[in-house]
Amino acid sequence: MTIKEKWLLLGILLMLLVGCGFKGESLTIYTSQDQVYAEPILREFENQSGIRIRAVYDSEAVKTVGLVNRLIVEKDNPQCDLFWNNEELRTRQLAAKGVLDKDIGIEVFGARTRQWVWNTNQLSLTSIPKNLTTLTNVQWRGKVAIALPLFGSTSTHFQILRQQWGKERWQQWCRALVANDVMTVDGNSVVVQLVGRGEVALGLTDSDDVRAGLKNQLPIAGKSIIEDGFVIRNSVGYIAGSAFPNLAQRLAAFLKSDSVKVTLIDAGALDSSSSGFGQEIDWPSMVAENEVAINELKSVFLD
């Protein structure tokens, strides 16, 4: 290759870089937000800011937990700048372990709700249980599906119930669910699919999964769990020792903006309203009890 050809090639590469709009700045985000929702938002931030984003997503089966464990392993050599979680408990666990920047703190935005989902060919609205304790009744034997409560929002939900009901009542209820042949599956979206196919009549899931099922024209309906339900908020955690803390704060501000919230609502990832769900959760206590609670759940649902 001649010198002239080398300069021509270099010029083309520079034009491509300028055309892509990147300024040479980049940062890494780990996120449990579903990739189908998160990726367009992160690409829009790239287009607006010129900052290149490297995103690492989780999987449905081990929702959030895989990323949390990875961040813990990387604590002394951070590979990530920002953690965007579509729930709150695991982010608070990271803070307790010193993975997050304690001077900035955790920020939350948006909301989803825990919901009943049912097959409209099998059940009517009036037949939906009034509360979660009813699921142990014989009329629901073998007719209910839940995500395995070791991961994601289902795990958080079960641990909130443990805190609110007390350990003894909660353990009895968990054992009674298993005795009543509740089906445990890999994630809330699978619950919706099973209900939609009529393999079970009723399930526990999240509001965004219900909306996805309705979009796919499944014969389902959903309703927020009022008694013993909870609001699932997105959370943002800044990684301690991040190489690009200022860029991370710029991205976090973008994620919390009204425009992104509207985008997530329009996509079905967030609820448009969460009024009526304002129960207090003792997060520090839940984080402290998490390992014990998970072991108790394993002993019930895996043994």
Image (cartoon, grey):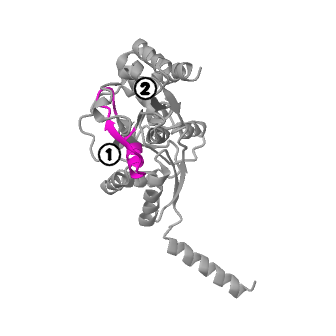
Q: Residue 59: x, y in percent?
A: 55, 43
User: Local crowd at mark 2 within 10 Å, few (<14), some, or many (≥20)?
Assistant: some
Residue placed at 55% from the left, 22% from the top? 298
Q: Percent from the top left, x then y, of residue 57?
A: 54, 48
Residue in view at x 50 percent, y 41 percent = 240
State the mark number for residue 158.
Answer: 2
Which residue is denoted by mark 1 in the rendering?
271
Q: Which residue lies most toward the top here? A: 168
Helix, strand or loop at mark 1 = loop
At label 2, the amino acid type is Phe
278 above or below 14?
above
User: Any magenta on residue 116?
Assistant: no
Q: Amino acid at mark 1?
A: Asp
Residue 222 is inside the magenta segment: yes
Residue 150 seen in the figure? no
Magenta residues span 206-230
